[in-house]
Image: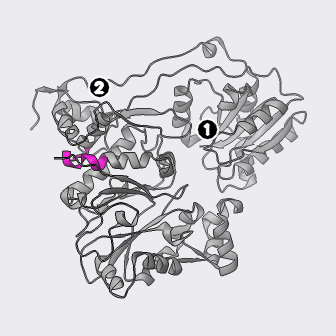
Amino acid sequence: MTIDHQYGVPTVAFHTHTFVRVVRSVVEVSGMPHMRQVFVPMPVMGKTPRELRGYIDGNDPISGRPVMQEVIEGLTRPFDEKELKEVTFERSTPRLVEPDTEENLHRLFHENLWTDQLPIILPTEERVAEMLAHTSHKPDEVVGRMRATHFREYWEYTVEKVAVNAVMAGCEPAHFPVVVAAVQAILDPAFNLRGVQTTDENVTPLLVVGGPAAARLGINAGWGALGPGWAANAAIGRAVRLVMNNLGGGWPGAVSFAGLGQPARYSLCLAEREDGLPWPPLPVELGYRPEQSVLIALRAETVINVTGGLDELGSVMGSAASLFGILHSGRVAVILSPFTARRLAAAGKSRADVRRELFARGRLPAEVWRRSWLHGTVRASDWPEWARTAAEREDAIPAVREPDDITLVVAGADLPIPQHAYCPSWGHPPCRVTREIVLPAS
Amino acid sequence: MATSDKVTVLNPMGYPPKVTHKSLAPRLDTLDGKTVYLVDCRFDDADVFLKQVQAWFAEHMPSVKTIIKPISNVYTKDDPATWAEIKANGDAAIIGVGH
């Protein structure tokens, strides 16, 4: 769009037909509703040159007209009077919804896609006010601006808007500082929220709460920490997802194109255990003081259960599950059972030692990499140099660029059956964003 | 239990910015003899697709000169140097393949 509007070069843009809704929405809100667009079938990726030539010789699946005729007309047909008419308009979001019965309001929220299509708590003024009483931030303070994609406009939102979504998700007011910290964290440019919102991969924020606030707020780090059954974990993660939808426009099929999705997209939030932790808490390892509570946000492509020891963890890390993480030099999470953590600590190993061991064991055989769909799909030069070098020299690629790219979280029940989880990564840049959780003084 | 009492709730949506009209470049009278840049946005296999567009022009409109030009970085970043180059040396652009 920039080249046409700012540089004055007549331009036509090709898109795949699946994205017609988002493409048209983007050009409209960008003030260029008559940008010339031509659509070809989805997918382009992985098709042979002959198949792609078939697209070009065929019809635009949206307009039904020949593709190249659309292209040529897009570059040569003058804009008509209607297209040249200047269209400028305000779009306001009223603070309040028109009063109605609870039943009708639930239906309205559902139909407007303001929910995750599960029942919500209606955000009455009283409930929102109670939520706001648990933060030192003022209601009209702008938390940030979020946009669904790099070519969409930024939407601005306030602390009150975050509180509204936290109420809807079922958060207790005491949880609100965690939600605010999480929303601040995913807005950090390093988190690449735009990518998370729009990719056709299934990545979602992994929210880890470390420090004394976790226990105080009832955020579970023990039995079944990843759910179900724990209101704080479920509601905090859900609040962040609703924020991503309602304040960042990440609706499935319109902006979010995760092909399969994953249950963790409803909520993926847990705490690190404090009791029985054989090492300094994760926030301390990341440079915080012991009395500070911290929200750690990572990008998780999925959650894979691993029962066993470091060998089993290394086996899963050194599998095709890590391909996207390797491609993007991502930072992964390993959730380690307390039983195993204590056993390793008793053997004299620090958290850093364990990371190094996992780094050494989690190796993807170069042959598996070369035979993979992803290897055959993306350009050779798109793979990071460290991965290509490792494949050539060592005939295997580490799951991550360096041991520090593994975030080691100790959580789960204190069972002698060691249950862990591996959360591979997706997306640029390498990411582990932290924000202090500021609890109200009282 | 649902009641007929009306309640007031807050809207959960963020605040979108004002939409401001932006003018697009005047279209060309013809493509004959013109230089058209085929801009590879570096989304997966866009280069393979644009080579086929180039082949189509060579077969059906040989007077059109086409140049395949990959953007300098990933498609999520603006590329003023490439846009300036196309402005200086070309007459039109075809960008592909975005989402």
The amino acid type of the residue labelled 2 equals Arg
The residue stretch that appears in magenta:
A169-179
- Tag 2: Cα neighbours inside 10 Å, few (<14), some, or many (≥20)? some
**Magenta span: helix, strand or loop, mainly?**
helix
Which quadrant: the C terminus of chain B? top right
Assign a secondary structure to mark 1. loop
Whole-number angstrom distance, CA of label 2 to CA of label 1: 40 Å
Q: Is residue B48 left or right of residue A107?
A: right
**Residue ID at (60%, 47%):** A42
**Tag 1 residue:** A61
Residue B47, how many percent across, how many down? 73, 50
Task: Check the residue under mark 1 and report the chain it is in.
Answer: A
Task: Check the residue under mark 2 and report the chain it is in.
Answer: A
**Tag 2 residue:** A95
Residue B64, how many percent across, how many down? 87, 34
**Is A397 rendered above or below residue A103?**
below
